[in-house]
Every structure is written in C-alpha cells, then in structure tokens.
Amino acid sequence: MKKRLIKLGVLLVIIALSGLLIYLYRVHSYQNKVSHITVQNIEFSSIPDGSYIGEYNVDFIYAKVSVTVKSGKIIHIDLLKHKTERGKPAEVITDRIVEQQTLQVDAIAGATNSSKVIKKAVENALNAAKAPNP
C-alpha cells in the first residue's frame, strides 16, 4: 500500500511539473508574440466607406473589432470581443484612435499588451478593407 501511494505521489508530481512547463512555454510564446507586434500607420483616406471586421490573437489576449469608415475617416470602432486578464483599461484605445485619426496612439499605461493587440486588430480590419474583393 505504501509503495502505491509513493508511486501515485511521484506520478502526481510529474503531471504537475509537466503542466507547469507547458504553462511556462505558453507564457514565453505569448510574451514573444506581443514583443514583436508592429502596427503600421494606414492612410484612412484610402479605405472605402463601410464597416470592417479585424481580429488579432496572441493566446492570452484576443481582440475582435468592427471599424466603420466614412469619407476617409474612422467614425467608430466597436470592440466586439476582448479576451484579457488585466487589460480592460486598454479598451479606451479605440476612442483615442477615432479622436486622433491614427493608429499611432500611445498604449494605455498598465495595459500595454492589450493596447497593442487591439490596435493590431484595427489595423487588420483596415487592411482587409483595402484588399481587393474576389
């Protein structure tokens, strides 16, 4: 009986360590993805009028947006989905993009990673708008 408990304990430790290693790998991968996000400035006047969907995912943070363009200006950004842990304050970045009419707005302090992901989702929506329809 004692040997079985020891084997079970060893097995549980191995499982726990494996889970920890997988989690640490995912965190490292997430941090690497976020550190390599670049957001290009887009000339809004080149975007046809309409609403466009864009999204971006780096595992721990995900954003999906609807960007409405009219007369060469972004008039509204609707944050359709934002998966985050502590990045909720970044959600105001959509207002800043509309106010300043540029994607080159400063990240929200304390929510830098979510800010980057949301801005990248907006960029992806605008790039989809520029892509030729098949």
Image (spheres, rainbow, N blue to C red):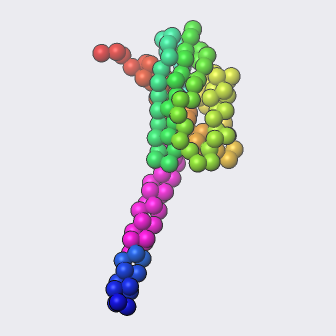
Residue 1 against residue 42 in the figure, above or below: below
Please identify the dominant SS of the magenta region: helix
Name which residue lies at 43% across and 72% down: 17
The quarter of the picture where the N terminus appears is: bottom left
Residue 120 against residue 4 in the figure, above or below: above
Name which residue lies at 50% across and 32% down: 64
**Residue in front for this viewpoint, 84 or 129:** 84
Where's residue 46, x and y in %? 50, 14
**Farthest residue, direction bottom:** 2
Where's residue 97, x and y in %? 63, 26
Task: Count the numbered circles shown.
Answer: 0
The quarter of the picture where the C terminus appears is: top left
Residue 102 visible at all: yes
Magenta-drawn stretch contains 23: yes
**Residue in front for this viewpoint, 50 or 106:** 50
| Left or right: 111 as drawn, with respect to 59 | right
Residue 121 visible at all: no
Residue range highlighted in magenta: 14-39
**Farthest residue, direction left:** 134
**Farthest residue, direction front:** 1
**Farthest residue, direction top:** 71
| Left or right: 46 as drawn, with respect to 77 | left
Magenta-drawn stretch contains 96: no
Name which residue lies at 50% across and 17% down: 51
Where's residue 29, x and y in %? 44, 54
Where's residue 49, x and y in %? 51, 10
Quadrant of residue 114 within the rendered picture? top right
Name which residue lies at 68% across and 22% down: 99
